Image (spheres, rainbow, N blue to C red):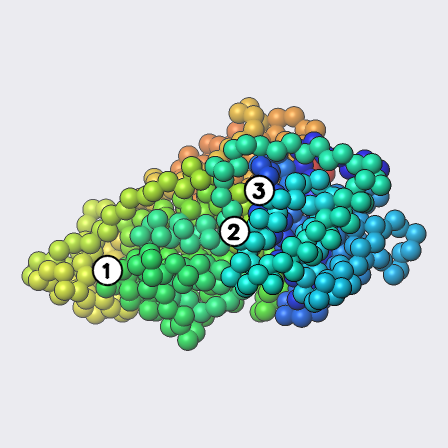
Amino acid sequence: MNINKLDDFTIVIAGQAGQGVESVSVVMAHILKKQGYNVYASKDVMSRVRGGMDSVSLRVSTDRKDAFVDRIDLFIPLHSGGYKHLEHRISEDTVIMGVENPTDTKREVKKINFIQVAQDIGNRIFANIVAAGAICGFLGINKELPINKLKEFFTKKGDEIVNKNIEAFKKGYLSGAHVAFNLDIEFSLVNKSDMEDYVFMIGAEAIGFGALAGGCNMMSSYPMSPATGVLTFLAQNAKKCGILVDQATDELGAINSTIGAWYAGARGMVTTSGGGFCLMTEAVSLSGMTETPVVIHVAQRPGPATGLPTRTAQEDLNLVLYAGHGEFMRAIFSPGLPEDAYNITAHSFDIADTFQIPVFILTDQHFVDALYCAPIGEFSEKSFENNIEVTEKDYKRYQLTDSGISPRGIPGNGKGLVMADSDEHDEQGRITEDMEFLRPAMMEKRFFKRKKLLEEVALLPEVTGEDDYEILVISWGTNKAVVNEAIERCSKDSISHAYFPQLFPFNKKVKDILKKAQRLVIVENNAVGQFANLITQEIGISFSERILSCNGKPFSVEDLEEEFNNL
């Protein structure tokens, strides 16, 4: 059995919710990174507190790999249900180390009853540490480093707990090493010495860091998976970062209080998912009419209604693009990697502030929950400027200007009266029904002039691959890394990739990039190709092929490699 991988190895741990699958993955991720390996972890969990089957994939590599793969090199089932859960990914080359499969007694399994070993130590709760030890033993990792890590993790719980975890780890380590010895495996993954330049970060944390870098000092949200991680991160860091975090009573309160915070001079953000954002759409119109900035993070999951609350999707582009009644301008961004999320989120605050519009950051469950080794150097300090005027007595909040951007004052910052009206208004902010001049002038100011300005500063797509491409694959959001790797692995010539960090509006130069291709291909996690439709609508260019998926799972490298080879 040949499982030696020179630079790429995938470990999958599966068990029931409550068995500590995530705990094993977190411990292993830190151990492997400390050993000098790049680690990328993604999870597949059911919407249950107990029962069901969950799994975590750890992709361990020499060079940075940030894409999901179907391949499993080492499978650790803590529960027999893991076989059914992952049957589509287990191959003949997969080494299985854990409980046996009751429905397939012919398949070779290196039996380790993690729960029984843990119970022998004193408590089945140690089963996940036994599993971590078995993985380390199988990989031949020097056990001193993991033991020191365990001491760090559990030192606050007292010496007895520390010693029990170390005992559990050592017993698992011996079992895993024994398996590797009997299979005559010499693990050959090459480690790197520069992993100290990388930091572990989940996508939700990258959004949170970007918000702080963009000057965010207020967050109001109502918890909803998978967006809650951003709220939690900012709440945990609220005191030391000087940010007010409010867990609102509902989504309406969350967005309205955030708009109110911007009106008062703060820089606020809301984080939610599609179902929560549905309740916020009237307030988005309020932001548009009053020209009050707001930044809204929407972490997508499959719908409609509750859908698949713990799975991933790219189904809410149309929702945020057309949310709200009437016509007003907005900007929409979507990061593909943690460093993108950091830069885009900080940039979103500047765009919202400068253009006085709602700005959306679209992510998805796969991105916000995935664990990345992100390069520290990409998270440089940002500077920002609050575009707030000191008002005079004759201040006009909605003054008609050549640019379409009025001077924004805040109450108490000067002598002027700062009015905000959700009805149509004149330059000062008083209600008007002047349909001959003011209504058309205000509409042009809110939408058309801003659209023209935003197109000039809109982010261009990142094009990777050959400059003289015949086939151009378009992606947005979390598909950035998987498309890049699939193109590297496919056998097609003259194929390149354009990742769009900004989904709306489009930079005027985008059309030239797309027109160079003889064939345009889109990759999206939705049923109709929402972004493809938007490009056709806005730019007038159609797509040759659409690679779409709406099953709640992320694309794998193998999926897309096959699709690209068949183009």
* Residue type pointed to by label 3: Lys
Identified at 92% across, 52% down, the residue is: 106
Residue 201 locus on image (x, y percent): 50, 49
453 versus 311 height, above or below = above
Comparing labels 1 and 2, the label whose residue is closer to the camera = 2
**Tag 2: residue type?**
Ile
Number of numbered discs present? 3
Amino acid found under the numbered disc labelled 1: Gly
The answer to whether mark 1 and mark 2 are in CB contact below 8 A is no
10 Å crowding of disc 3: few (<14), some (14-19), many (20+): many
Residue 442's disc is none
In the image, farthest residue toward the top: 468
Tell whether label 3 touches label 2 (CB within 8 Å): no
Q: Which residue is mark 2?
A: 202
Instruction: Please report contact status of discs 1 and 3: CB closer than 8 Å, yes or no.
Output: no
Q: Can you give x and y, in whole percent of width and height, for residue 101 in the image?
A: 85, 58
Identify residue for label 1. Answer: 265
Q: Which residue is mark 3?
A: 33
Asked whether residue 143 appears in the rendered view, the answer is: yes
